[in-house]
Amino acid sequence: MLAETKFAAEPLAKPALGEPYLLTPGPLTTAYSVKQAMLRDWGSWDGDFRAMTSDMRRRLLALTGDAKGEFDCVPMQGSGSFCVEAMLGSFVPRDGKVLVLANGAYGLRAAQTMQYLDRAYTLIDKGDYLPPRGDEVAAALEADPAITHVIAIHCETSSGILNPVAEIADAVHAKGRKLLVDSMSAFGAVALDVNEIRYEAMVSSANKCIEGVPGFGFIIARKSELEAAKGRSHSLSLDVHAQWAHMNKTGQWRYTPPTHVVAAFLEALRQHEAEGGVAGRGARYVRNRDVMVAGMRELGFETLLRDRWLSPIIVTFFNPAHANFAFDRFYELMKEKGFIIYPGKLTVVDSFRVGCIGQMDEHVMRRVVEAAAQSLREMGVDTAAPPAAAIAERAKLAA
Ligand SMILES: *Cc1c(COP(=O)(O)O)cnc(C)c1O
């Protein structure tokens, strides 16, 4: 409700000086005040910056609902993938084995990370359309007692599917194994409450639903897991235990922190709180998605996923079948109108994606639909209906 009144009245701040909106899953369109927070230099050793780091860790932890103080937050330099690698390398023992749940590019990247780490893993690959379900996770754990950990992708950003992480967590916990969650593109907008969902560690980054700029990520983990991670990491700079221990002892990051990015992120966290936290942020993204998807469907576009699995983060549409449609042209026409869309990342059919996250509201999303309609007209495409083959493929695989 808070977000409703805040965003219904007037559109959010426009990007500066005719910058296009980034309808992408991060980097994304940030608030002017977030950019402004970077106009100052901070000394990494100085008490002011140490206080900022500590405030940031506290605010992030609060988003998980950890009232008992069982968890801690460890920021880590680099993009989100660095943090996934840090988490896997630090929490999975060298003789452990991971069940990787994949239904898109980020799940497969987690598997690839395990290859680089040279640690054992097994993969459930559901393709592009379907979520891994609790019962199949339970069966896989039952069948292979060597599996110690499971990694699940919260929102698989390559399709936009919101995976049933609560159901997966129940299955993992019931079998006495440990769950690691890549909540990169969901955390801050979709609840991942430690009182409701059992997990040992999760990871996210600065430039997704909290709406900061890119430069670091963070791991939120049980303190018992952080303790146990000592000496496990394959990597000096990605050692989560070492970063945690150093930060708790000195208040500092182990190596040069992205000071401006942290300052911007703190401002983004303040705005997140003012919007009503996870619930308020999530509600705005849901409205963004609903307005955008309804408008696109009126133009004939179809979503890859059924409504049940559509996340409020990013939506995949099939490319239209019309002979005059060419994605590169569509992209340029949309960009001229102020909107950067995202190419698809599916293995089977041609698609593109439209993000719902960032400093945008439903008014902006209506303009996105208008821009799409106009772009189609300019291309001489009178309907955006996808090829029959795409629909048949979807029906077959999602049956
Ligand atoms: C963005 C994202 C990542 C990390 O990607 P980077 O490009 O390394 O920041 C990992 N997993 C998911 C699900 C993501 O959306």
Image (cartoon, rainbow, N blue to C red):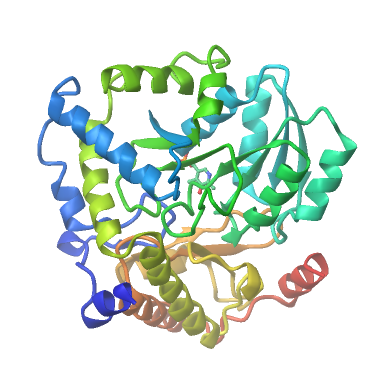
In the rendered view, tell whether residue 294 sits above or below residue 139. Answer: below
Q: Quadrant of the C terminus?
A: bottom right
Q: Please name whichever residue, 175 or 23, is drawn nearer the observer in this view of the structure.
A: 175
Snapshot quadrant of residue 2: bottom left
Q: Residue at x 24, y 57 (%)?
A: 271
In the rendered view, tell whether residue 193 sits above or below residue 335. Answer: above
Snapshot quadrant of residue 284: bottom left
Instruction: Give the residue at the far right of this rendering.
Output: 143
Report the side of 129 relative to 345 (left or right).
right
Q: How many marks can you see?
A: 0
Q: Please name whichever residue, 127 or 374, is drawn nearer the observer in this view of the structure.
A: 127
Report the side of 341 relative to 307 (left or right).
left
Residue 396 on image: x %, y %: 82, 69
Q: Please name whichever residue, 142 or 397, is drawn nearer the observer in this view of the structure.
A: 142
Residue 351 on image: x %, y %: 59, 64
Q: Quadrant of the N terminus?
A: bottom left
Report the side of 243 relative to 10 (left or right).
right
Q: Residue at x 29, y 65 (%)?
A: 275
Residue 352 on image: x %, y %: 54, 63
Q: Residue at x 42, y 76 (%)?
A: 287
In the rendered view, tell whether residue 273 sits above or below residue 267. Answer: below
Residue 3 on image: x %, y %: 31, 73
In the rendered view, tell whether residue 25 sits above or below residue 321. Answer: above
Report the side of 203 relative to 22 (left or right).
right
